[in-house]
Amino acid sequence: MKFAHYKHLIKCDLLAINNGGGILRNLFFNESFSFTFWFRIGSWLENGNHSILHFIFTLFYKRKMCKTARQIPLGTQIGGGFRLIHYGLVVIHRNAIIGKNCTILHNVTIGKTHNGVPRIGDNVTIGANSVIIGPICIGNNVTIGAGSVVVKDVPDNVCVAGNPGRIISNNGLTAGRGY
């Protein structure tokens, strides 16, 4: 893909933070944006023909992953408006597909089983300590509660919580008592 595409993704990531600072301020003082910025640049280099620059950058990015405890391989398909909230382990499988405006909190795993990897829609928020594994589809406008384990498909416009994950709210209407 062309650099213009990655530039657009970086702008969307910056808008998602919505803290009023410019790109340089966020690059140096907002670890979430800094990580996603370098992820986008590295993904562009990975998809291009920049072998020496890519090698040097890969070393830099691996150090960044260790420092922030985030394991997101370069080239992973993640839409614009991506936000990582809080420090903490975040593991995303290389083949997972994540839509636009996805927010991920700390200690989240999006992983593979022997059958495949998840596809996550647009406008999804994934709570802390959640696990999403297998060849499943998470719909658009979904909230996954903290500590959830999701192993089945999730439709659009719902809130999922629990282990195993179950729908607790649909379009703002509570599905069960106590939530």
Image (cartoon, grey):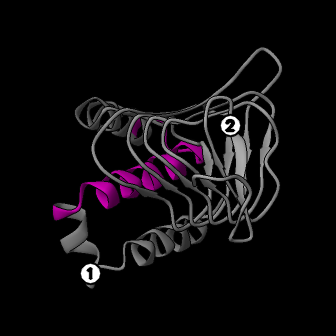
Percent x, y for residue 2?
62, 64
Per the picture, the main secondary structure of the magenta-coloured stretch is: helix
Over which residues does the magenta segment extend? 29-52
Instruction: Give neighbour class at mark 2: few <14, some 14-19, many 20+ (Cα, 10 Å).
Output: many
| Residue behind mark 1 | 22
Look at label 2 and name its amino acid.
Gly
Percent x, y for residue 129?
45, 35
Q: Residue at x 43, y 49 (%)?
A: 39
Look at label 1 and name its amino acid.
Gly
Q: Residue furthest bottom?
A: 20
Q: Residue at x 35, y 40 (%)?
A: 57
Question: What is the count of numbered marks?
Answer: 2
In front here: 148 or 26? 148
Q: Residue furthest front?
A: 177
| Residue behind mark 2 | 165
Task: Specify whether 41 is left or right of 76.
Answer: left
Q: CA distance from mark 2 to mark 1?
A: 38 Å
The answer to whether 6 is drawn above or below residue 131 in the figure is below
